[in-house]
Image: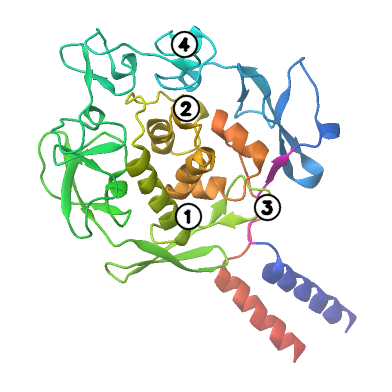
Amino acid sequence: MGQFALLRVLLLALTFVAVVAPSANCFKYTCAPVRLTPSYNGRSPCIYYKSNVNSIYVVPCQEEHMQCAFLAWTNDAECSTRQGFSSIAYPGEACSSNDQCSTFNCYNGVCKGAELDESCTDNQDCDVGLACQKDMRCALVQNEGQLCNEDLACASYLHCVNQTCIRYGSIDTGVRFRVFAGQWNVQGLVCKSGEAEALAKAAGPGEAWFICKKGKWLKSREDENCTYKDEDTGELTWKIASCGLSWENDTFCEIASLDKQYQSTFRQFIDYLDSVKPLCSVAYTRINPYSTLLSSDSISLSRKFFCSNWKRLPEFESMKRNFSQNLFPDNYVLLAKTDFCVTKVVDSIYFKKSYVPSFALPAASVRLALVFILLLMLL
């Protein structure tokens, strides 16, 4: 009898763990208390794992010439001198010295590029509002309605669609269009709905066909299963929630184009482009792939749309962050509920902390079976 009672207690305990235990064992990412900040090698730490609280403490680098150098083979990271393309500023972006600019020309706190008709070898050589043409001269970028042979030929607030520079958010649902392949993966941003789908249709050399769709929305979440509904087909699809860089040890579902946050940010973004018409460098952003966590498209486009010339706008920084977070599904998971320190570090170098689950929980169906066992034992 005693052995049966003990077995019953163990089963109850296991059932309780399976039913009420958190669905994921994610790290918490948060600003580090000063008293817990370690000091080693004479350098300032920027990422510090605190095992007794299962947290990653984050300290943004204070010096402008320093960045948080995340190392995949260690738990911690420290501030080091900026290296690689991630620290280069393009024409129109802020600078304090010539060596910070891709053009080595810092004038009045802003990187300057070659002017109209001056020689160039790449788009990043030319000043804002200009692009490097086939004759290796800087020429004016194309305005709305003008012909284009690549996206970079258009002003930074326009996109090359059907070989014409058009505004973002201007194509109706159900309309097919073609773009030049190999550019930024932003086809959905040219649709009024904010979502597009690739078509298996023959196109010209270097081109691809898309169609604007109604979009999807997050219908429900049960445990770690995120259920989405496609408004075009009515079909349901599922994805598993995953850990981010938040202050909560929780998982997040990817954002969908019809979700409220996506649509609110998308409308704000379109209004910003239509009213401000920012002219930023049309150069591709050069990114060190070994230090990149966020979508490379979001990083490049953030610099294309939100160059430092527009920091005087009160809502600039929040709009820039919302753009990177809410219009890119993978980024949303990483940036949801991040605090100031994490945001500063992610903006600087884009890091990821390796994560290995300490305990694999049973699937939802198994947990339901254990609940049934619990009920039987209580009868």
Mark 3, residues whose alpha carbon is within 10 Å: few (<14), some, or many (≥20)?
some
Q: Is the C-beta separation of discs 4 and 2 under 8 Å?
A: no
- Judging by the rendered image, the residue that carries numbered circle 2 is 308
Give the CA distance from mark 4 to mark 2: 13 Å
Q: CA distance from mark 2 to mark 3?
A: 32 Å
Which quarter of the rendered picture does the N terminus lie within?
bottom right
Q: Outermost residue, right direction?
A: 2
Name the residue that disc number 3 marks. 248
- When asked about the image quadrant of residue 129, the answer is top left
Pointer 1: what residue?
A: 254
Callout 4 amino acid: Cys
What secondary structure is marked by label 2?
Answer: helix
Q: Residues within 10 Å of mark 2 (few under 14, many from 20)?
A: many
Foreground: 19 or 186?
A: 186
Q: From what the image shows, is residue 8 above or below residue 97?
A: below
- Image coords of residue 249 (percent x, y): 67, 53
| Span shown in magenta | 23-31
Left or right of residue 87, residue 186 in this image: left
Separation of residues labelled 3 and 1 (CA atoms): 16 Å
Q: Residues within 10 Å of mark 4 (few under 14, many from 20)?
A: many
Seen at 57% across and 50% down, the residue is: 336
Quadrant of the rendering where the C terminus is positioned: bottom right
Kind of residue sitting beneath label 2: Ser
| Residue located beneath label 4 in the image | 106
| Disc marking residue 280 | none
Up-down: is 43 above or below 183? above
Q: Position of residue 236 (x, y in %)?
A: 37, 69
| Mark 2 or mark 3: whose residue is earlier in sequence | 3
Q: Quadrant of residue 43?
A: top right
Q: Which circle, 4 or 1, is nearer the viewer?
A: 4
Q: Amino acid at mark 1?
A: Glu
